[in-house]
Image (cartoon, rainbow, N blue to C red):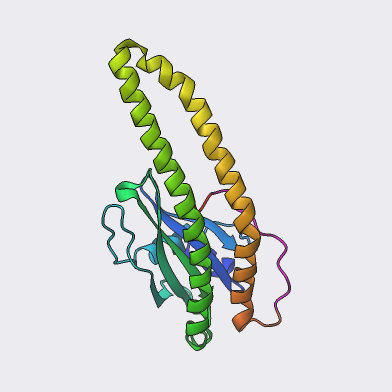
Amino acid sequence: MQNQIQQEIQTDIILVCEFCQQKGPDVLFTFPNQKNSLNEIALQIMATNYQSSKVGKPSPDTQFVIKINTNTEIPIYSYVHHFTLFDVEARGCVRPLCFSYLSHSYDKIMKNFTRFMKYFSKATTILKLDNLHIFLQRLDLRHKDLIYTNEQRQINPNIISVIFSALVPEYLADIEHIRKNVMKSISEELADILMKILKISNPKISQIDSFSSNKNITK
């Protein structure tokens, strides 16, 4: 596995990962896209987040540099930017995530640390604003569902299961519509910021056309 890690980052890459309650550290996407798994690196990076979040209150962003443990002679270093988003499904309604800039050059990362912090902070701001919008919408839906359920329970307790069967498909369709609209609006702006980050220490890098993710960040 360590040799795989070494082969996967022949060039500098940006890794975005989260701590999933069901699976643990999980890679959301890489920029540029990587075909091979970077879950071993994600595990090491997410283990460095010592911030704790209170219920409904995300912890402050943290930024630092770490060395990824490998068995190879060429070391791997990472600028790490931990942040959290709101999530109605997550424990405490907060979801830990992380931006990481991976490189073999420690000097490159330290030289550009301040600039990395600036641009990654811009990227997290985009995600946080859209995430807050989605979170409040979902919270409002939950609230309305509870009010409606309570009203129907008082009228006829036996009808509750039928009501839920009718509401769930509509609820899921609305959430999916919101997700698609948000991802469409933020993907281009986020990709532009990530490209600027790569160009900080790699000015000759060509434009990256491929930017895709199978997973939703701001959900």
Q: What's the magenta region? A: 205-215
Q: Residue at x 34, y 29 (%)?
A: 147
Q: Per the image, is 15 magenta?
A: no
Could one spot residue 166 in this view of the protein? Answer: yes
Q: Residue at x 34, y 60 (%)?
A: 58
Q: Quadrant of residue 19?
A: bottom left
The vertical placement of 10 against 149, above or below, is below
The vertical placement of 46 against 143, above or below, is below
Question: Which x, y percent locates residue 215?
Answer: 54, 49
Question: Which x, y percent locates residue 79?
Answer: 46, 75
Question: Which x, y percent locates residue 62?
Answer: 37, 72
Q: Per the image, is 208 magenta?
A: yes
The vertical placement of 105 against 149, above or below, is below
Left or right: 107 in relation to 146? right
Residue in front for this viewpoint, 149 or 219: 149
Q: Residue at x 64, y 81 (%)?
A: 202
Left or right: 64 in relation to 13? left
Residue in front for this viewpoint, 29 or 68: 29
Q: Quadrant of residue 194?
A: bottom right
Question: Which x, y percent locates residue 107?
Answer: 50, 88
Secondary structure of the magenta portion, mostly? Answer: loop
Residue in front for this viewpoint, 89 or 203: 89
